[in-house]
């Protein structure tokens, strides 16, 4: 299995394991939903840059969720 196939497999796994809607993943990563769909269907392979954008989007989402959890706990008194 080549490097591009390994990256495609990993990206597919990450997208599925995130359990986030594809539209939200695309928005967070600043990529098109069509690109995500093409990766999942095997019609296109993600580039390293696209995978990095996806990772950055996931990190931004995680940071936002941590902040919201902090706010909620802070409001509990």
Image: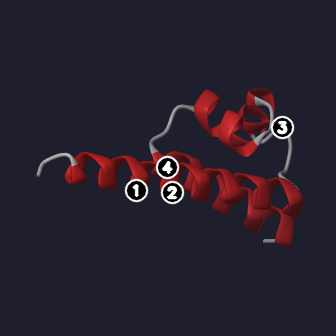
The local crowd at label 2, few if under 14, some if 14 to 19, many if 20 or more residues have their Cα within 10 Å, is few
Dot 2 and dot 4 residues touching (CB under 8 Å) = yes
Res 45 seen here:
yes
Q: Distance between the residues labelled 2 and 4?
A: 4 Å
Q: Which mark is first along the chain, 3 or 2?
A: 3
| Secondary element at tag 4 | helix
In the rendered structure, find residue 64 and report the number of the disc placed on it: 4
Quarter holding residue 47: bottom right
Q: How far apart are marks 4 and 3 (CA)?
A: 32 Å
Q: How far apart are marks 1 and 3 (CA)?
A: 35 Å
Residue to which mark 3 is pinned: 43
Q: Where 18 falls versus 3 (above or below)? A: above
- Image spot of residue 70 (x, y percent): 32, 55
- Residue found at x 49% / y 49%: 64
Quarter holding residue 49: bottom right
In the rendered structure, find residue 63 and report the number of the disc placed on it: 2
Q: Which mark is first along the chain, 3 or 1?
A: 3
Say which of 50 and 76 sits in front: 76
| Secondary element at tag 1 | helix
Q: Which mark is first along the chain, 3 or 4?
A: 3
Q: How far apart are marks 2 and 3 (CA)?
A: 32 Å
Dot 4 and dot 1 residues touching (CB under 8 Å) = yes
| Secondary element at tag 2 | helix
Res 2 seen here:
no
The local crowd at label 1, few if under 14, some if 14 to 19, many if 20 or more residues have their Cα within 10 Å, is few
Number of callouts:
4
| Secondary element at tag 3 | loop
Dot 2 and dot 1 residues touching (CB under 8 Å) = yes
In the rendered structure, find residue 66 and report the number of the disc placed on it: 1
Q: Distance between the residues labelled 2 and 1?
A: 5 Å
Of circles 1 and 3, which is in front?
Answer: 1
- Residue found at x 71% / y 52%: 54
């Amino acid at each position: 299995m080549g490097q591009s196939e390994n990256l495609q497999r990993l990206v597919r796994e990450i997208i599925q394991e995130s359990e986030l809607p594809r539209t939200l993943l695309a928005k967070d990563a600043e990529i098109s939903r069509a690109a995500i769909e093409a990766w999942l269907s095997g019609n296109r392979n993600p580039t390293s840059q696209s995978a990095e954008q996806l990772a950055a989007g996931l990190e931004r989402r995680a940071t936002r969720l941590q902040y919201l959890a902090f706010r909620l706990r802070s409001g509990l008194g």
